[in-house]
């Protein structure tokens, strides 16, 4: 198997673990949500890993930053969808709080990685 550099990043490994946990939780959602909220949650979770992988595979720092920003946006989208899932009693507070801890950690990691690729002038903004 060809090992790409993004696969060695802790942020990618954490995002991948989050996707797996989200998929496990989605098995418990009602059938009527399969093509509604479940689909949106899956897409947001997968988008995080996909955009980290794509961004870290780009040559320019500007492109890396762009895809990391999309990954962060997808992470926030996932958080909002999980919050709605709690309100609808699809997951409980304990499950949500566990995922929020992971989301918070990933958010900090994505932000730190993004800052690494920002041009020096942009870091002060």
Image: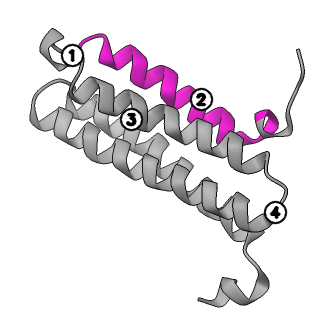
Query: Mark 2 or mark 3: which comes first in sequence?
Result: 2
Checking the image for residue 98, the label placed there is: 3
Q: Nearer the viewer, residue 6 or 90?
A: 6
Q: Nearer the viewer, residue 16 or 39?
A: 39
Checking the image for residue 16, the label placed there is: 2
Quick check: 71 left or right of 121?
Answer: left
Q: Nearer the viewer, residue 88 or 105?
A: 88
Percent coordinates x, y for residue 97 in the rendering: 32, 39
Q: Is residue 91 above or below residue 9?
A: above
Residue on which the image places disc 1: 29
> Going 27% across and 47% down the picture, which residue do you hit?
80
Percent coordinates x, y for residue 111 in the rendering: 60, 62
Whether the magenta-drawn stretch holds residue 22 is answered as yes
Percent coordinates x, y for residue 79 in the rendering: 34, 45
Checking the image for residue 60, the label placed there is: 4
> Going 31% across and 18% down the picture, which residue do you hit?
26
Whole-angstrom CA distance, mark 2 to mark 4, is 24 Å
Secondary structure category for the residue under label 3: helix
Q: How many neighbours does mark 1 have within 10 angstroms: few (below 14), some (14-19), or many (20 or more)?
A: some
């Amino acid at each position: 198997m060809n090992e790409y550099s993004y696969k060695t990043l802790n942020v990618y490994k954490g995002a991948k673990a989050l996707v797996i946990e989200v998929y496990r939780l989605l098995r418990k959602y009602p059938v009527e949500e399969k093509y509604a909220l479940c689909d949106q949650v899956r897409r947001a979770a997968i988008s995080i890993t996909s955009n980290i992988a794509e961004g870290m595979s780009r040559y320019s720092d500007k492109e890396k930053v762009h895809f990391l920003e999309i990954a962060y946006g997808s992470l926030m989208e996932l958080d909002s969808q999980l919050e709605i899932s709690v309100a609808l009693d699809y997951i409980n507070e304990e499950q949500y709080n566990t995922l929020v801890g992971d989301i918070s950690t990933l958010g900090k990691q994505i932000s730190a990685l993004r800052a690494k690729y920002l041009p020096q002038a942009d870091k002060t903004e």
